[in-house]
Amino acid sequence: MKPLLGCFFTAIALCAQQPHLDFLNHNRPVLDAHNCYPYEGRYADRIDRVLTTSFPVAIEQDIAWAVDRTTGKGRPVVTHSAKTTGAEPSLRDHFFERVRPIIEKALAENDRAHWPLIIVHFDFKSLDPKLLRAVWDVLGEYQSWITTAPQTRDPHQLAPLDPKPLLVLTEDADAQEKVFFRNLPPGTGLRVFGSAHTARIRARSERQRIHLAATLPPERLLVERPTNYRRWWNNSWFEVEEGGQNKAGDWTPADARRLRALVDHAHQLGYWIRFYTLDGFTPEENRGWDNSYNFGSRQAVEARWRAAIEASVDLIAADQYEDLAAFMRDHRGR
């Protein structure tokens, strides 16, 4: 009886961690706009394009430090490279001021059941504490827009989220956790939530590491429980199909079971889960997208989009914003 009782109480403990999962679109999939910013001045319409799809929507912003050419002052900018010129758009102008009308309208309407409307995901190109602190300060300027949770003395005590139209996520680096979480006194509102550490894979070669990433049980890849700060799990497609997008063959029932097992494990522990980046395009259709994320055809990527939706992946990252948004709308209508 003791093992059964242990399982019972473990299940209760896991369920107690999970209420916040429903906060993100009632635990239904969300389009995640990958690399939603200009590349050296090109593709500057990306954020405008995704904001015309539907809500809620996630928007990835890669961030680095740059010195403004006019003022000579440093600032966080959105960029695809850690090497900056100073001509890059600032995080404040490119993202926060662009979404201001949407956020202020949402605050005025106060329809909390549909919050967050926007999930912004920060991918830092540098972990310089100066950059991290500057981003924390920018977030402070817009804190009335941002979903927060109070800092707790025990990191594994997940405080309830205070809903706002904007939810801010970032990735797993310990340097970010130090600035955004560990250095904060109890009671301080957390402005940003980090991702889980995927367990380190011990392998004799890169080939073996790639094989293990796609075959190890989910319990071996994600071991730690969520914390008040670490609330989501960020995955490449290498954890689903061995070798990722460029090595993928036909989508199979075994692939679907693998995807669902990863999602179910994350949700059972109390994490949201994201997969990146699911694209399918020809060379003629390419709009500045990375071919390493390309399944090669619309038919191939739609099989994965459908599987991700059916498995309840929380954040489905793609560069083909309008196409995935339309596909998700059609799937909801069935």
Image: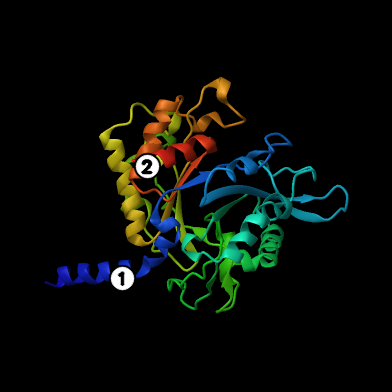
**Total number of numbered labels?**
2
Q: Which residue is mark 2?
A: 333
Is 321 left, or right, of 299 in this rendering?
Answer: right
Q: Residue at x 52, y 49 (%)?
A: 57
Q: Which residue is mark 1?
A: 13
Instruction: Give x and y (percent) for residue 301.
Output: 42, 31
Instruction: Give x and y (percent) for residue 125.
Output: 64, 48
Instruction: Give x and y (percent) for residue 121.
Output: 57, 52
Element at badge 1?
A: helix
162 vs 289: above or below: below
Q: Quadrant of residue 246?
A: top left
Q: Quadrant of residue 144?
A: bottom right
Q: Amino acid at mark 1?
A: Ala
67 vs 300: above or below: below
- The span from disc 1 to disc 2 (Cα, nearest Å) is 36 Å
Q: Residue at x 66, y 50 (%)?
A: 63
Q: Amino acid at mark 2?
A: Gly
Circle 2: is it few (<14), some (14-19), or many (20+) Cα within 10 Å?
Answer: few
Seen from this angle, which residue lies furthest left? 1
